[in-house]
Amino acid sequence: MSPLLEVKGLTKHFPVSKGVILSRLGETVKAVDDVSFSVEQGETLGLVGESGCGKSTTGRCIIRLLEPTAGSIHFDGTDVRKLRGRRLKAFRRDVQFIFQDPYASLNPRMTFGEIMAEPLVIHNLGTRREREQRCKEMLEVVGLNPEHIHRYPHEFSGGQRQRVGIARALMLRPKMIICDEPVSALDVSIQAQIINLLEELQDEFGLTYLFIAHDLAVIRHICDRVAVMYLGKVVELGGWRQVYNDPHHPYTQALLSAAPVPDPEKQRQRNRIILRGDVPSPIKPPSGCRFHTRCPIAQFPLCSEEEPPLREVAKGHQVACHFAKSFPIPV
Amino acid sequence: MLRRRKGQVEIDESTAVAGLGAVEAGEVFVGKGRTLRADAIRRLRRNKLAMAGLVWIVIIILVAVTADLWAPRYLGDPTYIDTSRVAELSLQPPSAEHPFGTDKLGRDIASRVVYGARVSLLVGVVAVFIMVVIGLFMGAIAAYYGGIWDSLIMRTADVFFAFPYILFAVALIAVLGKGFQNVFIAIGILGWPSIARVFRSSILSIKKNEYVDAARAMGASTLRILGRHIMPNAISPIIVYATMSIGGAILTEAALSFLGMGVQPPDPSWGLMLSEARAYIFTAPWLMFYPGLAILTTVLGFVLLGDGLRDALDVKLKE
C-alpha cells in the first residue's frame, strides 16, 4: 500500500530583499532543503527540531499555504503541487491544519459557530440548520458546551480556543491533519488534555497526523515515527523507539540529552551533550554536513566537504551522518 | 444580567475541560452571547467624555439641519444687510434680541454661527468621505499588491507629508479656484495619505494572523478572505481615524476661510467670521468669541467621540 502522504525532495527557499528603495535580490533563506518523508494511513509522524529549522515551513508547503521551490508532494496518489482551482479546493477538504497560536488562529469577530461552520460554508455543505447542528455536535466532541456556538473567542481561555481550532479542523472529516505545534502555546496542564483529545480523535475518526513540535516529550507521547530536522534537513528518521532509545545522529543525541528527566537523581547522573555555538544562518548554511560546525564527532575535512546522505542503519531507521554510532561521543 | 455573564466568562480551565466530552458544570447562563456591536455600543455608552462629544455633535447637526425653520425668524437673516440701519445695528453687544450680538454690518451673529455649522459639518463630512475613499483604495492596493505598488503609493504619501499642510491647501485652492467645493477637494486630496497609511498597516498586521492562513488552508476564496476576515478587523482604526479627521477638516476649513480661500462673503462660515472679527477683537470681542467657541467645541466633540470609538471597537478589551 502506498503511503497517504509522500514528500520527496521538498525545498523551500525564501528570497531575502535588502535595501529600501531598490530592493536587491539574490540571497535566499534555505528554510527547507531536500526533505523527504512519507506518512502512512492512520499513523502519526512527528517532525521535531529547534525553532527555525524549517518544520513549520514544511507543513505549510504541504497544504500549499506556501509554494515549494522544488520537490514533489503526493497525497493519496495525487500530485499536490499541480493542483489548481476546484481540485485544490477538494484537496483542502481532505487535509486540515491546526495552528500553533489559539489566540491568532480564530477570527475575533466571528462566533465559535461561525468559525466552525466556515469550512462547511466554503465547501457548500449542508443547510444552515444542519451546519449549526454539526457545530454543536463537534463542540461536544472536543469537550466544550454546545451552547457556546454563539460566543466569541475572547471570552475563552487558550485551551478552550485550541479545542475550537481542533473542532474546525474536524468539520470536513479530513483524512489527514497537520498539527503545527498545537500545544506549545498552552499551559503544561492543558497540553496533556489537548494531546489526549487529539489521540482520542485519531481513533474515533481514523485520522492521520503530521505532528510538528519542538517538545520531545510531546512527540514521544503521540507519535509512531519521528523525523528530526536540523537547518532545513532531516537528519534522522525512524520509529519513536528507535529514535528515542537508540539515537544515531549526534544532533538527536544532543537533543535528547537536553530534555530534562523527571527523576532528579537520574538527571544528575546523566551525560549532557552541550552543543557549542549557535545555529548557523540558513542564508549561508555550512558546507558538507550542516551540523559539522557544532558536531562533537566531526572529522575534517570529510564532514565539511561531503554532505552525508540519509542511510538506513536499521529497518525503517535512517540517519544522515558519516560517522553515526561509529564513534563514541566525547563528553 | 451583565454581572452574571461577566462571572461565567472566566470559567476556570480546569473545571471547564475536566475531560473529553465534559460540559462545564455549574454554568448558570448559556444562551446567546451578546453581539459584538451591542458590546461596542455598551462600551461607548459607558465612556462619559465620548458620550458628551456625541451629544454635542447631534445637537450641532440638529441645529444645522433645522436652521431654516427658526433661525431667520427669531435671530435674523444671516446674510441680509439692512443698508438703511447699518450704523444703528452695527457691533451691538449680546442682548435679548441678538443673543450673540451683531457684526459690523448689523447681521445677527447667532444666526451666522448657526448657518456656519452647516458649512463646517458639510466640509467635515464630505471632505473626510473623499479622503477615506481615496485612502482606503490606495491603502488596500499598497497592502494587497505590495512590491512596486506599495513603494509607489507610500512614497507618494511621504511626499504629501513633506509639504506644510495649510500651505499646500492654499496652493491647491489657488489652482482650483476659491470657493466652497474646492475646500472639500483640497482637504480630501491632502488627507488621504494618512488614511492610506493607517489602513495599509492595519491590513498588513491582520494579514499575518493565523486565522487568515486558516481560511486559506480550508479553501476560502480571496474575496471571502478579504470580506470576512481582513476587512472587518482592519476597518475599525479607519472609523476612529475618520471621526477624528472630521474635526481636523473643520479646522482646516476654518483656517482656509480665515485666509479668504474658502467660503466667500456674504455666506457665513466660522473661519470667515473669525477673519472678519480680527479688527474688533478689543472693541467687540463677541464677534470672535462665539464662532471660536463653536469651532472649539465641535472639533473637540469629534475628537472625544473618536477616542471613545477606539476603545469601544477593540474586541479584546474587557470591561
Image (cartoon, coloured by chain):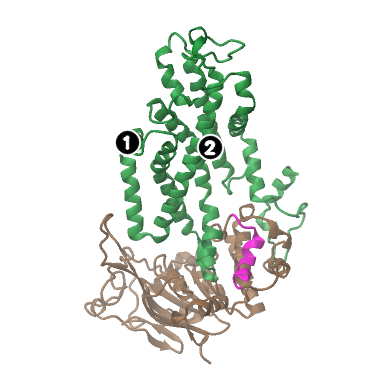
Chain colours: A brown, B green
To the question of a shared chain for discs 2 and 1, the answer is: yes
Residue B313 in the image: state x and y as whole percent: 57, 45
Residue B263 in the image: state x and y as whole percent: 44, 30
Query: What amino acid type is highlighted by mark number 2?
Result: Asp
Q: Identify the magenta region.
A: A109-123
> Furthest-bottom residue in view?
A1
**Location of residue A90 (image quadrant):** bottom right
Ranked by sequence position, the earlier of labels 2 and 1 is 1
> Furthest-left residue in view?
A301
Q: Nearer the viewer, residue B224 or A119?
A: B224
Residue B297 in the image: state x and y as whole percent: 53, 26
**Chain ID, mark 1:** B
Judging by the rendered image, the residue that carries numbered circle 1 is B171
* Cα separation between marks 2 and 1: 32 Å
Does A134 sit left or right of A56 as displayed? right
Q: Is the magenta stretch mostly helix, strand or loop?
A: helix
Does A110 sit left or right of B169 as displayed? right
Dot 2: within a 10 Å radius of its alpha carbon, few (fewer than 14), some, or many (20 or more) residues? Answer: many
Res. B262 visible in picture: yes
Does B52 sit left or right of B132 as displayed? right
Residue B164 in the image: state x and y as whole percent: 32, 35
Q: Residue B307 carries which label?
A: 2
Label 2: element kind: helix
